[in-house]
Amino acid sequence: MKKEQRMASEILEHVGGKENIASLTHCMTRLRIALKNEDLAHIENIKKIDGVMGVVEDDTLQVVIGPGTVKLVTEELETLAKVEAQEGEDPSEDELTFSEKAELSKQERKRKNQTPFKRFLRSLGNIFIPLIPGLVASGIINGVANFAQNSGMDPAEHTWLQVMLVLGGGLFAYLGILVGWNTAKEFGGTPVLGAIAGMFIFNPALADITIFGSALEPGRGGLFGVIFAAWLMAYLEKRIRKIIPTSVDIIFTSLFTVLIVGFLTIVAVMPAAGVLSDGITLGIYWVLDVGGAFAGAVMAGFFLPLVMVGLHHGLTPIHLELINVYDFTTLLTILAMAGAGQVGAAMAIYAKTRNQRLRNIIKGGLPVGFLGIGEPLLYGVTLPLGRPFITASLGGAVGGAWQAVFATGAGGIGVSGLSLTPLIAEGAYLTYLGGLGLAYLFGFIFTYLFGFKEHMADGI
């Protein structure tokens, strides 16, 4: 039972039941109940309800609940008591209780702090945080399996390793579907329609379709494309529903939504997201060509935004070309530092925060973070908090500069973090681990000193 449902149920019980309610109104902070028989109300019991800040006895019984929550409790009480509530006038400032003043002040600070960018980050967190348990489980399996493979174990000769790779990679193969589901849910749409948006973008059958003279590329645009397509699903669904008769809503609302968004995704969303992917990839290649510590710092520092939108897989052709020309890729070791900076940032937040939910998320994400699976920490910790995302990137930049100076490289493509160690070329294992340690250290230092304050964890 949700908090608002529980509160409404307990309030109804202690005011004498629905038969004793004459009318309901609410203002910004108070639920006002006109009672038929005031003697049936148990005021002391109402005051003890978890979430109730106080009770004011006037011409109506005024239950102080606080801004935001009061509207939700009133709606639940309407349903239980079968009484339609009205919106009443707010009390004057002199009439407010101390608890109300404190709560209103807190809400005002939160309102001023809710910039569009922070709301966007919060929405991203709401999309990815529910996926963290699966990401953690799959990440651990994937990290162990990739470490074994990087060490020279051939999956073709070991069935158990093949099974581990399938189990570990399953979630990541279909992550777009789950992201689409949560995106539609976050923006008020039907979750399954968002999942369908993810299926559109990663459907292998797209390779058989030619539009504007070019064959479509499954997965083009990555998770960025999925999030936008799923948001579009939610946006159109709500507007189409307004003009579709209720009697045929279940048939035509979803039908028109899927058809319209499906075509828009294929002809507009995927190409646009693909252009974005190409632009970012070419930009990183240019930075790599500049060379030196500056290039390493810039590439590692700006890699997390690429991971954030799922476009980092577009770098695979560059890695392969570097291996083909130089026998190893220095780009991979540099970019691996971005995840290491994030690990350091997460450890700093864990050391500072008192928020138990945030600490639990970090405890779940750190093991796979060390193994090079950064999604749990990225989507569950640094990105929703905002500033730690920047300090994590700065920590990664220090490690990236180190790797660029010493030109460490990987002889193959694998998971980053500690799991990449067996693939380091020319025996430069300690050099690679030294850069990894620096990224951990500076990600921790930057975040501990500048990146995190306790109020950032409110509501996570």
Image (cartoon, rainbow, N blue to C red):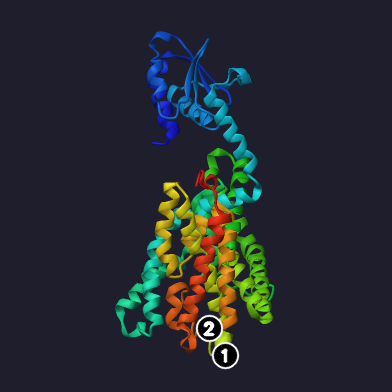
Res. 326 visible in picture: yes
For label 2, the residue is: 409
Q: Nearer the viewer, mark 1 or mark 2?
A: 2
Residue 356 location (% of width, % of height):
42, 47
Q: Does 154 sit left or right of 305 as displayed?
A: left
Q: Which mark is residue 326?
A: 1
Disc 1 from disc 2: Cα separation:
10 Å
Of helix, strand and loop, which one carries label 1?
helix
The amino acid pointed to by label 1 is Tyr
Res. 178 visible in picture: no
Residue 233 location (% of width, % of height):
58, 53
Residue 342 location (% of width, % of height):
51, 63
Q: Nearer the viewer, residue 350 or 184?
A: 350
Question: In percent of the image, x 67 and y 81: which residue is there?
Answer: 289
Q: Quadrant of the N terminus?
A: top left
Q: Nearer the viewer, residue 413 or 25?
A: 413
Q: Nearer the viewer, residue 14 or 300?
A: 300
The amino acid pointed to by label 2 is Gly
Q: Which mark is residue 420?
A: none
